[in-house]
Amino acid sequence: MIRKAEGDEYEAVMRVLESALLDVNPHDVRAALAGGDVLVAVSESHVRGVLVLDGTRIEVIAVTRTHRAKGIGSALVDRAAERGPLTADFRSEVRPFYDSLGFEIECDGDRYHGRLPMES
């Protein structure tokens, strides 16, 4: 199930993000959580995936290692896309993920910028 994260899920959200070895600012995550800008994928009462937004910009997305390649990341992005066209900045290693979702991608050195247009 994909839904907005609840205020008391901060620790679970941070565990998923930290287990993915992502460089995230805990204060930014807490603020996004308070603003309703964190989506979670929940299975068996556990947070398995997290997507943090800043408006329609994907700040970070992570799925627990044992639940990767099961469509959770795609489902999180699909839900986030309900807000409008999404954008994201990411490293080359995750470009195949964004390619598979239909992001229009531009390269700027070692970083990539992607935009997911609205479906017509």
Image (tube, helix red, strand yellow):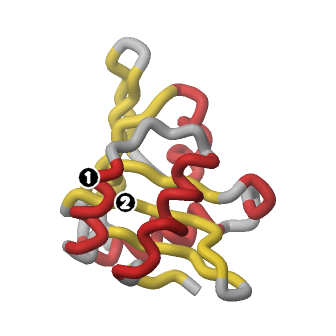
Figure check: 94 above or below 109: below
> Is 26 left or right of 1, judged from the image as shown?
left
Q: Are marks 2 and 1 in contact (CB under 8 Å)?
A: yes
- How far across and down, in percent of the image, does residue 53 sit? 30, 60
- How far across and down, in percent of the image, does residue 37 sit? 28, 69
**Can residue 117 be seen in this snapshot?**
no
Figure check: 94 above or below 27: above
> Is 85 left or right of 91, judged from the image as shown?
left
Q: Residue at x 60, y 74 (%)?
A: 47
Tell me if mark 2 has few (under 14), some (14-19) or many (20+) residues whose alpha carbon lies within 10 angstroms of its own: many
In depth, the one of 53 and 77 nearer the eye is 53
Figure check: 88 above or below 111: below
Q: Quadrant of residue 89?
A: top left
Which amino acid type corresponds to the residue marked 1 in the rendered image? Asp
Q: Residue at x 65, y 79 (%)?
A: 46
**Residue at the right extreme of this rendering:** 66
Q: Number of numbered discs present?
A: 2
In depth, the one of 57 and 102 nearer the eye is 57
Q: Which residue is mark 1?
A: 28
Location of the C terminus by quadrant is: bottom left
Q: Residue at x 46, y 71 (%)?
A: 78
Figure check: 106 above or below 5: above
Q: Which residue is mark 2?
A: 52
Which amino acid type corresponds to the residue marked 2 in the rendered image? Val
Secondary structure state at the residue bearing disc 1 = helix
**Residue at the top extreme of this rendering:** 109
